[in-house]
Image: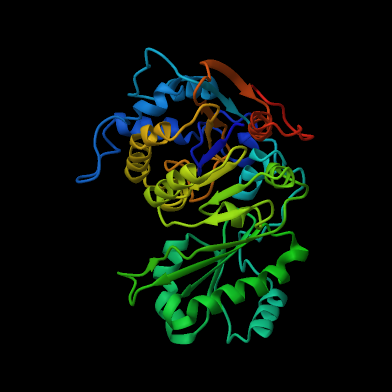
Amino acid sequence: MARAFLFVLDSFGIGGAPDAHRYGDEGSDTLGHIAEFCAAGIGDRKGLRSGPLSLPNMSALGLVEIARLASGHLPAGMPIPERVFGLYGAASEVSHGKDTPSGHWEIAGTPVMFDWGYFPAEGDAFSPELVEAICREADLPGILGNCHASGTEIIARLGEEHIRTGKPICYTSSDSVFQIAAHETYFGLERLLSLCETVRKLVDPLNIGRVIARPFVGETPADFQRTGNRRDYSVLPPEPTLLDRLVEAGRHVHAVGKIGDIFAHQGVSRVLKANGNMALMDVTLQAMDEAEDGDLVFTNFVDFDMLYGHRRDVPGYAAALEAFDLRLPEVHRKLRPGDMVLMTADHGCDPTWRGTDHTRERVPIMAFGPGIKSRALGIRNTYADIGETIAAHLGIPAGPHGRSFL
């Protein structure tokens, strides 16, 4: 029996979304613009990286051709490989959003065909009634923030006041999300998580996708730093996902990183946490050793989005991609006959784009493993084709959305 390994490179979009104009993202292209900046020398950073974007292993898996397929042009400075290995193509998103749950649920065969609730972009993000309820239920003296903001910026701006007053920092973004930043020592991690559980219940009637705990440490804006104890409190997917179907069939789903949180721990057999892409890769390789026949190892590599996309850091994003690419041979060496690795993304977060939010883009599909022959997949009409491909590979019945490309 086969095993499957699904890697989501969080926010690694490739442009070309046919509905990008509806989101104000027409022309956004995470891979294309990173490559363009690197080729022009704007992606250089002393002591980190320099020169054109170098992703030889992903290029050999079809990434350069995928980019041309999705956006109509080749990534600048990236050579075309002589040969492509495995299955390669692109996918468009049909879900009503460009957020993490929508992307992941659609990858797992369950598109989001409803509209999320969002908080206002102008003025106070949260209504007086909601703020009053939060303070009453959680016994708080008040909240700080109450606006759209970048997480690192608002912690630097309000962190000292938070420590002094005990008021948590509450903010949102263009996603359907309520984020709460609080100091692990002065406020307390367990208290922050309990607060998030309270807020989760209060925003359920508003159809808010996630409440996110953003713990941080440090004493001053110069050394405030978010920790690896982030926790996402997501609503349940609207119907059973690939993960549920696998567990029901007696298989094990090994959720690495924030996958468990994204799926509200539904359809998850085992949660494996780590902080940072390289640590996530280490844990994934361990899970590959331990996975049994018929299992799925599902990993989200969050740094691309959290550390570099939202912060509009082109050199950082490029260096993270190059570091990830260098480790793919380790993945290949773990494979057994019948295994399949499938790499994709959940949305874009173009670090050259205006603002700090996600961008509506197509995502790459790169699938490889022993016995998998090279073949172009074209452009798939939904991310759900990815989940249905894994279902077919692992021998469980097809779901109602998407179609396997095996």
Q: Residue at x 62, y 41 (%)?
A: 23
Residue 9 or residue 270, whichever sits in front: 270
Q: Residue at x 42, y 75 (%)?
A: 159
Q: Looking at the picture, how far across and down is residue 183, in whole percent?
A: 44, 76
Residue 104 or residue 391, whichever sits in front: 391
Query: Going by the image, does 400 lie left or right of 331?
Result: right
Q: Looking at the picture, how far across and down is residue 163, in whole percent?
A: 43, 82
Query: Going by the image, does 268 lie left or right of 328?
Result: right
Q: Quadrant of the N terminus?
A: top right
Answer with the quarter of the image where residue 41 lies: top left
Q: Looking at the picture, how far across and down is residue 152, in whole percent?
A: 42, 62
Number of dots carrying numbers = 0
Q: Looking at the picture, how far across and down is residue 61, in whole percent?
A: 45, 24
Seen in the picture, residue 24 relative to 187 is either above or below; the reply is above
Q: Quadrant of the C terminus?
A: top right
Query: Going by the image, does 215 lie left or right of 171?
Result: left
